[in-house]
Image (cartoon, rainbow, N blue to C red):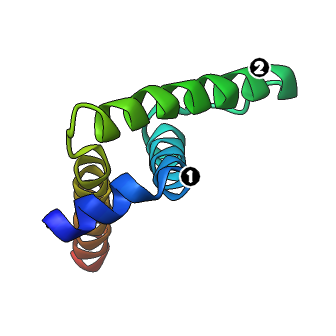
Amino acid sequence: MTSATAWLTQHYWVTYIIIYVFITYVYNKVFKVRRLPILKELIIYILLGFGALILLFFQHDLQLPIVFCLAVAIALMFLVRVRFFVENRRQQRKP
């Protein structure tokens, strides 16, 4: 884990892109209820970029495991989606 953290510390842009992609995925799957007008969506994605910059600061300067925490959050979201899929399938088979 420390070698991965050291690699992320050395590569700022890659870490920023990973954080931005992760928080964008979380936003789209959890918080996005309906389609917004294009200007409002652009503002939201710019703010997500600013938030990713703040999280990058936490990752590099404060040595917090932001990328790993976001990866765990996405893994848990995937696990919930699989569980809902299995439950829906089980309910469809019952007469």
Q: Which mark is residue 40?
A: 2
Q: Residue at x 53, y 45 (%)?
A: 20
Residue 39 vertical position relative to residue 89 in the rendered view, above or below: above
In the depicted view, which residue is nearer to us: 77 or 7?
7
- On the picture, is 39 further left or further right than 44? right
Question: Could you tell me which secondary element the residue under label 2 belongs to?
Answer: helix
Q: Where residue 94 sits: x, y (%)?
A: 21, 75
Q: Kindly identify the amino acid type of the residue bearing the numbered disc 2.
A: Lys
Q: Where residue 48 sits: x, y (%)?
A: 57, 30
Q: How packed is label 1: few (under 14 Cα within 10 Å), some, or many (20 or more)?
A: few
Can residue 95 be seen at all in this image of the molecule?
no
Specify the farthest residue to the front: 10
Question: Could you tell me which secondary element the residue under label 1 belongs to?
Answer: helix
Identify the residue position indicated by label 1 in the image: 13
In the rendered structure, are the residues bearing label 2 and label 1 in contact, judged by CB atoms less than 8 Å apart? no
In the depicted view, which residue is nearer to us: 2 or 35?
2
Specify the farthest residue to the bottom: 93
User: In the rendered view of the protein, which quadrant contains the C terminus?
Assistant: bottom left
